[in-house]
Image (cartoon, rainbow, N blue to C red):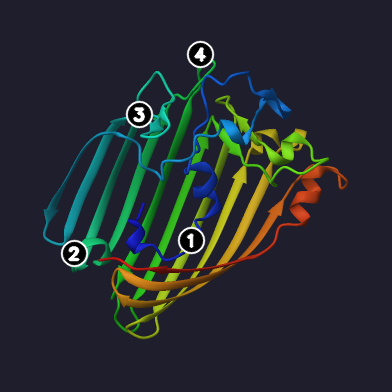
Amino acid sequence: MNGYMAYNYVVFPTVINQLMLQPFYASQPSRPYAVGPSGSVLVPGNESLGVNAFRYPGVQVFDWKNWGHWQFAYGAMVGMFGSVSAGNQSSSPLYAARVQESYIFGGHGPFRSDLTGWLWYQYAQPDYLGHSYAMQREGLGFQYLQGYMHPWGRQLKFEYMRGNGWIDAPSAFSQQLGLQPALYQTQLYPNVNNSASGYYVEGGLFLTKHIEANIRYDYYDRLPNLASVGQQRIFKTWALALQYHITPITKIMAGYYFRTVDAPHVASNSPGAAVSKVVDNEFAMQAMISF
């Protein structure tokens, strides 16, 4: 992940938002979660323990080695599946590792000019009612960045990731009278045979020293293993963004997101089809001021 100061969009790709920004749920709720479709459980909003913004407490070892313009780097971590506020939600450690290789054209830090490729892996065993479930994630990607905050500076990035086990299907709506619980409660598919995958590709170009235009496409295929029973959802989003950089870490960001959701193998009058038809586009704007 990029540090947020180096991020080009207000809204994450769907594959990151759903597969990697993992909410925590009470592992010992006051009563068992209701049974949902296809082996899922329905998690009420009051049992959600929030997210950790990708920050798992733990111990990490990392290092890098340079050979001229080439650089090899790695990181390995043993941590806690949980957060400082939620506490530990697993009786087993979380493991994560990443390796990357870079060719550095010049500069340093997150805005250096380079070409970098990477591989990463994450494994945890969330608990629910005394049973441990596997949650595995892995990905690969590359980024080319050259000429940050220079006219015609450019960026190209691609990343693919997949996961098995502990797949979230977030609620579509807030609770209203007459809605089915599956529409206002999170559907959690805990078993290891459940899967999801996706990718995003993005590009950026500095039109002047301060103005950068960005475009991104992201794709997320959730629960393709349950396509035959109508639980698969495919998310596709185009993002157009514009940034005004005051300094490298102080800027104004704006983006428009064209969003679609496909629900294969569902009846035309089903809730899944109805939800996919009412997905709207999104506009987001943010000022980031750092010092």
- Indicate the position of residue 277 as horizontal and vertical percent values: 78, 56
Which mark sits nearer the N-terminus, 3 or 4?
3
- Mark 2 in CB contact with mark 4 (< 8 angstroms): no
Q: Is 118 or 26 nearer to us in this picture? A: 26
The type of residue carrying mark 2 is His
Q: Nearer the viewer, mark 4 or mark 1?
A: 4
SS state under label 2: loop
- Residue behind mark 2: 108
Q: Quadrant of residue 230?
A: top right
Q: Which mark is residue 201?
A: 1
The type of residue carrying mark 4 is Gly
Measure how far apart labels 1 and 2 are at the Cα level: 24 Å
Q: Which mark is residue 130?
A: 4
SS state under label 1: strand
Which mark sits nearer the N-terminus, 4 or 1?
4
- Indicate the position of residue 191 as horizontal and vertical percent values: 58, 24
- Residue behind mark 3: 80
The type of residue carrying mark 3 is Met
